[in-house]
Image (spheres, rainbow, N blue to C red):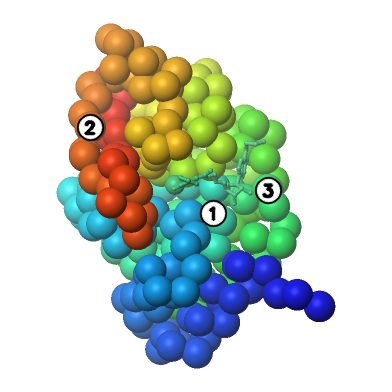
Amino acid sequence: TQSTRPQRLLGAVQKNATRGDPCSVVKAIDHFCRHKEWAMNVGDEKGCILDSVVSEINPATVLELGTYCGYSTVRIASRLPPHAKLITLEFNPDFAVIARQVIAWAGVEEKVQLVEGASGDWIPKMKEQFGIKTFDLVFLDHWKDRYLPDTKLMEECGLLRKGSVLLADNVICPGTPEYLEYVRNSPRYESRYFKSHLEYTKVEDGLEKSVFLG
Ligand SMILES: CCCNc1ncnc2c1ncn2[C@@H]1O[C@H](/C=C/CNC(=O)c2cc(-c3ccc(F)cc3)cc(O)c2O)[C@@H](O)[C@H]1O
Ligand SMILES: [Mg+2]
């Protein structure tokens, strides 16, 4: 039977990356996506911006919306301080199976809780299920029309505190116009655009970093 692209991406990790070495996993995926098959990972260029935001915040609690194959999960987890927790939500079970293996190969499973299910169902349960009070950092990289409703849901559930940072992928391509309009015009956010390129291409894209002001 035919393999899927995520399965082939995992194969490239297992073939070319060193177990327990997150950097080699990231490099193996980037090489595969640049030279073999494009895939919708945040990628190396935007990934460096993600890395700098994570290092700047040094978060104790991180939420990722949309795990896909776990590329950004590994990038974030490998930069977290000890005892920090990254919860990543993925509602496609086939992608979750691949992501768990990528995360394990990188050796960052201690810091990662991959939760299978939809963000809309799980965001209201974060406190009771995982003992989370608020998130220091949220990385949005799931369906683009869900960025805004899920942000409003996180506000309503009290999961954001003064200083919480939302970092959103793809605000130009494919684009998240309603989300951008909201965070850029709301008095409750201080928003900034980091210009970059769509992963593995020369097309413009970027990340929007929005600090919740409480
Ligand atoms: C109920 C749906 C909302 N809640 C959700 N809860 C949990 N996981 C969710 C999710 N939505 C989507 N997901 C998962 O996130 C992932 C979806 C990501 C969507 N991303 C994109 O569409 C995307 C697309 C591009 C792209 C850009 C240009 C182009 F020509 C083609 C594609 C680039 C990117 O960087 C992207 O992130 C999948 O793994 C999906 O199963
Ligand atoms: Mg993306």
- Look at 59% across and 76% down and name the residue there: 8
User: Would you say the beta carbon of the disc 1 residue lies within 8 angstroms of ligand 1?
Assistant: yes
Residue highlighted by disc 1 = 67
Quarter of the figure with residue 101: bottom right
Report the number of discs. 3
Residue 165 appears anywhere in the view: no
Q: CA distance from mark 3 to mark 2?
A: 28 Å
Q: Which mark is residue 91?
A: 3
Q: Name the element at disc 1.
A: loop
Q: CA distance from mark 1 to mark 2?
A: 22 Å
The one of 190 and 207 positioned closer to us in this rendering: 207
- The residue under the point 45% across, 36% down is 174
Classify the position of the C terminus by image quarter: top left
For the point 50% across and 81% down, the residue is 12
Q: Position of residue 110 (x, y in %)?
A: 48, 69
> Label 2 sits on what residue type?
Tyr
Earlier along the polypeptide chain: callout 3 or callout 2? 3
